[in-house]
Amino acid sequence: MFVNGLGQSRLSWDEQLTPAMTGRFRIVTYDLRGHGDSDKPPTPASYADGAAWGVDLHAVIEQTGLRRPLVVAWSMGGLIVGHYLERHGAGRIAGINLVDAVTSFAPGLLSATSAELGKRLALPDLAVRSDAIGAFLADCFATRPPAALFARMLAYNGMMPRAVQQGLIGITTDGLDRAFAAVPRMLISHGARDALVDVAMSRRMLAINRSARLSIYSNAGHAPFIEDAARFNRELAAFAASPTGDLP
């Protein structure tokens, strides 16, 4: 079960929808509320409650008939999974792969660049907001992907209404650490060259969940599953297949 990040879509995971992966695993992707082809409520209040995002994830799991799925959460997806866990517990999932995931708003865990872009993404001036979308997407990568892929990502990032960014400031992370601590198996993937989320965000999870394993991608930025897809898929497949979560 793949959960995309802010401004992204289910298309973010195309590198994971390879024959090698789909031949072994059932894979489900979806667009978050306000993203891609999903409904886009016009008010910030529709995005300000973390529990609502968690309810959405629960609904997708239920409607697709997944039984104890492994949940992969990128960036803001970490918050969504955290709120899912807080409401529904960890008993219905097999484990979590956090990918450069936001799990706390404590000082120093998000970069100054991330905070500055977040403010610009909520502004009413379309020109300013459009420039911020381009800058945000560029900062997701240590090495920019092929032009066609970047153009596609830019298009669906532009589909997100600013109400999403306006509402996000209302989401709390209170209690999420307790929820993450109860996850039975956890893999943490993080790009060492991430310009948006400091690696300290991922390292802190090692103390919260004793089953967690951290995999650092030395040449990747905020999107290691795109920047080093072969390694990411290999490690995710090994994690999914191993009862102890061992990596290759």
Image: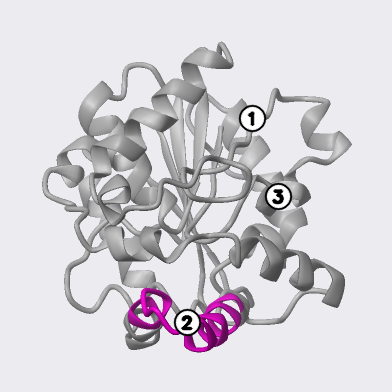
Labelled pair 3, 2 in contact (Cβ < 8 Å): no
Location of mark 3 (residue): 11
Q: Residue at x 36, y 65 (%)?
A: 165
* First-in-chain label (2 vs 1): 1
Asked whether 161 or 19 is in front, the reply is 161
**Percent x, y for residue 163?**
37, 61
Disc 3 marks a residue whose amino acid type is Leu
Asked whether 79 or 198 is in front, the reply is 79
* First-in-chain label (1 vs 3): 3
Q: CA distance from mark 3 to mark 2?
A: 22 Å
Q: Secondary structure at mark 3?
A: helix
* Label 1 vs label 3, nearer the camera: 3
Asked whether 201 or 150 is in front, the reply is 150
Q: CA distance from mark 1 to mark 3?
A: 11 Å
Label 2 neighbour load within 10 Å: few <14, some 14-19, many 20+ = many
Location of mark 2 (residue): 195
Disc 1 marks a residue whose amino acid type is Val
For the stretch drawn in magenta, the main secondary structure is: helix
* Magenta residues (range): 118-137
Q: Quadrant of the C terminus?
A: top right
**Percent x, y for residue 170?**
19, 57
Does the magenta run of residues contain 120?
Answer: yes
Q: Secondary structure at mark 1?
A: loop
Q: Residue at x 77, y 72 (%)?
A: 151
Location of mark 1 (residue): 28
Q: Is residue 31 visible?
A: yes
Labelled pair 1, 3 in contact (Cβ < 8 Å): no
Q: CA distance from mark 2 to mark 1?
A: 28 Å
Disc 2 marks a residue whose amino acid type is Ala
* First-in-chain label (3 vs 2): 3
